[in-house]
Amino acid sequence: MSIFIRIWFFFSLIVVLSLSFIAYTLTQQVKPNVRQVVEDTLAENANIIAQLIAEDVDQQQVNTPEFDQKIQAALSRQLDATIWQHKKGQINQQLYITDPKGMVIYDSEGQAVGQDYSKWNDVYLTLRGKYGARSTATNPKDRNSSVMHIAAPIIYQQKLLGVVSIGKPNQSVQPYIARAEQQLIQQALWIAVLSLLLASMVAYWLRHSIDKVRRYAQALAPVNQAPFFYSAKELNQVTQALSDMREKLEDRAYVESYVNTLTHELKSPLTAIQASAELLQDALPLADQQQFSTHIVQQSQRLHSLIERMLLLTRLEKNQHGLELQTLD
């Protein structure tokens, strides 16, 4: 497997796992946060209703048909509201009223009148001057059947007359929770797709850049231009290291060629000098001696010329980076 595919895979894996964890954490926070807002609203409504019905409770009017008709009319009021793209057509609340002992004296659903609710947390805590709330499932097998009850004390002329408790099914706020969770998941998916696309672009750029360095390293032409990367200092350092290594290798090859050529050039005059010197050791006429002596001098001058050219070339090679260039006609 290519290293670039591995980089892309592990980067993508980290992004997906991180987004999954964040999305899971946020969705776990949506439900309690929504219910906290609902609880806050119910607490305010309970205290408002407690104040409005205080006089009726004091005058024992809660058992009359008129009182029930007024409550039922309020709870059955039709709504035509669009709340965060959710169509709401009716009120999803219920209430019951207890006396100071916790006995139910009115129930909007007509089922709990006469029952003892003094042990329920909403009634029990409110009768003792505390904040009373509870959430109870109407069907133990269905977790979504729970109803949130928030209670408030009924006080008339500084006398505690009982408790009014407002209930709201948690199922009624489920559309808002589901919509919030859906939006979170969609946004997480979009972010994941964009992150994977970005990871692909980074992996492609890295592969393309390293491939340029590879092609530069493989090229043997001395005029090959070294690639430069504006946003990758490390790649530029690798390119420079390859350039230095390539220059040293080229210098080494040049020295080897130069030594071979120089050896060949020196071999011919040395051979001629040696042959002439061996002949001069014999008894030769004066004319032959002068001829071989002249030949030795000529070959010696040739050797001296080669040495001078070698020294000049060495100085040029040593100062090749310090040469001053001029444009001439």
Image (cartoon, rainbow, N blue to C red):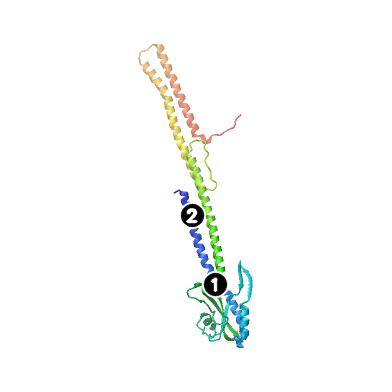
148 to 264, vertically: above or below: below
In front of the other: label 2 or label 1?
1
Compared to 271, does 79 lie above or below? below
Residue 206 position, x and y percent, is 50, 48
Frontmost residue, 142 versus 127: 142
- Mark 1 — residue? 171
Distance between mark 2 and mark 1 Cα atoms? 40 Å
Give the image quarter of residue 98.
bottom right
Q: Of the numbered discs in the image, which one, if any, rests on residue 11?
A: 2
Query: Percent position (x, y) of residue 212?
Result: 50, 43
Q: What kind of residue is marked 1?
A: Gln
Q: Secondary structure at mark 2?
A: helix
Nearer-the-camera pick, 140 or 210:
140
**Pointer 2 local density, CA inside 10 Å: few below 14, some 14–19, many at least 20:** some
Q: Residue furthest bottom?
A: 59
Residue 215 is situated, as x and y percent measured from the top left of the image, at 49, 41
